[in-house]
Image (cartoon, grey):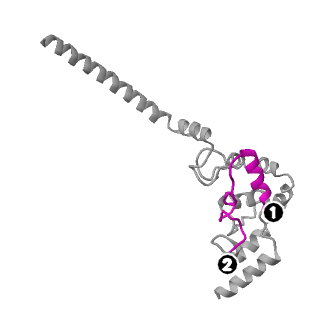
Amino acid sequence: MRLFVIIISAALIQVTTAFAHPEFQRYSKEVSGRSVNCAVCHRHSDGPEGLKPGQIGSLDQDELNALGLARQALKPGAGAQSPILNEFGNSILNQLGKEKISELKQRPELLAGSLSKTSDLDGDGIPDVEEFKDGTHPLNSLDGHPWKLFKNNLGKNWFDILMIVLATGSGLYGLQNMLLWLSLKAHREE
């Protein structure tokens, strides 16, 4: 059965296009100046074609059926879940639909303007669309533009930071006064 799936998968790879869109990857790389791989949208960093996990050649029959349904998701909101796309890639597919994505291939700079400005799949406080433009991974909360991560973390943790600063300041003040007291006591005993 596994051999049959591999043969069918290989045939599908040859007969159909994998629907990878390197135009978006190139745009993100150009705008951000960062190294951006296929894993921003795909399950595998080498993209959809191949035999590795998350690539077309590794899919079982149920996953091939899901891939077929995802390829038919021409309009937004179809709820398709492609087994070769990660959560961000599927989010793009469901927000825009295949027709709009294919249309945007000619002008990849317009993709960011077409996506939700509020979606933040990794919860790092940076919207996915900004992470796409920054060349960072929208599913990794530790991968983000350093300044934006700093500002978001500062905003989330300001109270804790304030308490640490106050505790440190109080501790240093107390230590200074204790050392002064010990110094005065030592001078009195002389």
* Comes first in the chain, label 1 or label 2: 2
Count neighbours of disc 2 (C-alpha within 10 A) and say few if under 14, some if 14 to 19, many if 20 or more: few
Q: Measure the alpha-carbon separation of dots 1 and 2.
A: 21 Å
What amino acid type should be assigned to the residue bearing mark 1?
Answer: Lys
The quadrant in which residue 10 appears is bottom right
Residue pictured at 75% horizontal, 55% vertical: 25
The C terminus: image quadrant: top left
Q: Which mark is residue 60?
A: none
Residue 70 versus residue 167 in the image, above or below:
below
Residue that badge 1 annotates: 98
Q: Which residue is mark 2?
A: 62
Residue name at image x 71 percent, y 48 percent:
129
Q: In terms of image quadrants, where is residue 85?
A: bottom right
Badge 1: few (under 14), some or many (20 or more) residues near its Cα, within 10 Å? many
Q: In this orientation, which residue lies closer to the viewer: 96 or 13?
A: 13
- Check contact, mark 1 vs mark 2: CB within 8 A: no
Front position in the image: 116 or 7: 7
Give percent across and percent down for residue 23.
Answer: 80, 56
> Where's residue 189, x and y in %?
12, 13
Q: Residue at x 69, y 54 (%)?
A: 36
The boundaries of the magenta stretch are 21-50
Q: Residue furthest left?
A: 189
Element at label 1: helix
Disc 2 on helix, strand or loop?
helix
Q: Quadrant of the N terminus?
A: bottom right
- Compare residues 188 and 60 and report the one nearer the observer: 188
